[in-house]
Image: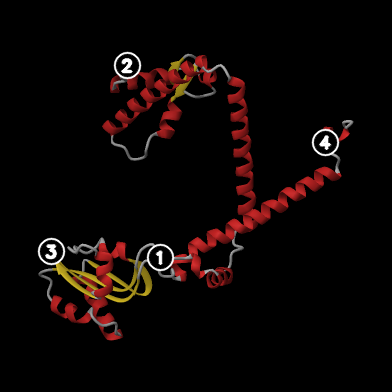
Amino acid sequence: MKVTGVLFFLLCLFSACQKHYEHNGKHPLVEVGGHFLYQEDLAAAQPVGLLKDDSVLFAENYIRNWVEDILLYEKASRNIPDNDKIDQLVEHYRRALIMHSYQQNLIEQKLSGQITEEDIKDFYEKNKNLFVLDEPLIKGLFIKVPLKEPGVNNVRTWYKKNTPENIEKLEKFSLKGAVDYSYFYDHWVSVSDMIDKIPLTVSEPKNYLDKHRQIEVKDDNYWYFLNVEEYLGAGQEKPLDFARTEIKEILMNLKQVDFMRKVKADLYKNASDKNEITYYYLNKDE
């Protein structure tokens, strides 16, 4: 059955009239075989900022899906005889979730901030072969200027050379005359990010920038200027700046393994010292 906007309103009105103590203060919207969907659950699931019509449509679909899931669950429950095995799987999964949550809390408390910049640099220097670029990187400058903007010919001269004078002129010009201005002579940028800004019509734009370090193209509205000062191709060593996050994750994982091994060993020792562990099989006659 489709839940219309009017019916949804009536459901909400009906639920608001329910006695709170019957559902621990919640307001039921739908019941299927003793399973309840509450107004609070629907509100928590609804994306923020939906328009009124979209909100009603979302509610209709959510309620319909919930009802169908409950009906499928009930049907499956009646036709899956080995519930003991499922209960064991659920318990194992629950136990794993609890342990994982506890471990994450411990790690955040004990290991947060323990990865230093020196650790990162040291690991990078010793393992550069592990960090290889999947795509090219470049350093340079990009500026996007309207076709009819006065001074565009000056930009055509300034962008080609990385000098303090040219950069100062470009920065002043960009405050009013540029639609987009990116200075990245001091850090690496992926070629993909830059190509997305330029209407290049070449077959392999990533490789094109290696051989054509100064790009000037235009469309119906803008000029696009790109100066590539440095280029690192795919397969080359990844710069430290691009490898930093990856290295930090590796180091954190290594510390986590050592840390949790110690936590488990300490727990085992404490339980053994207090005679809280009983090995029945050791007491059996061989």
Q: Amino acid at mark 3?
A: Asp
- Which residue lies under the disc numbered 4? 279
User: Mark 1, mark 3: which one is toward the viewer?
Assistant: 1
Q: CA distance from mark 4 to mark 1?
A: 53 Å
Quadrant in the rendering for residue 167: bottom left
Earlier in the chain: of badge 2 and badge 1, it is 2
- Image position, residue 144 (x, y; %): 20, 68
Earlier in the chain: of badge 4 and badge 3, it is 3
- Report whether 260 appears left or right of 21: right
Q: CA distance from mark 4 to mark 2?
A: 58 Å
- Which residue lies under the disc numbered 2? 1
State the residue at coordinates (24%, 78%). 170
Earlier in the chain: of badge 1 and badge 3, it is 1
- Which residue lies under the disc numbered 1? 133
- Image position, residue 71 (x, y; %): 43, 18
State the residue at coordinates (64%, 54%). 257
- Image position, residue 138 (x, y; %): 33, 71
Q: CA distance from mark 2 to mark 3?
A: 53 Å
User: Label 1 near label 2: C-beta < 8 Å?
Assistant: no
Q: Which mark is residue 219?
A: 3
Q: Amino acid at mark 2?
A: Met
Q: Amino acid at mark 1?
A: Leu
- Report whether 1 appears left or right of 33: left
Earlier in the chain: of badge 4 and badge 1, it is 1
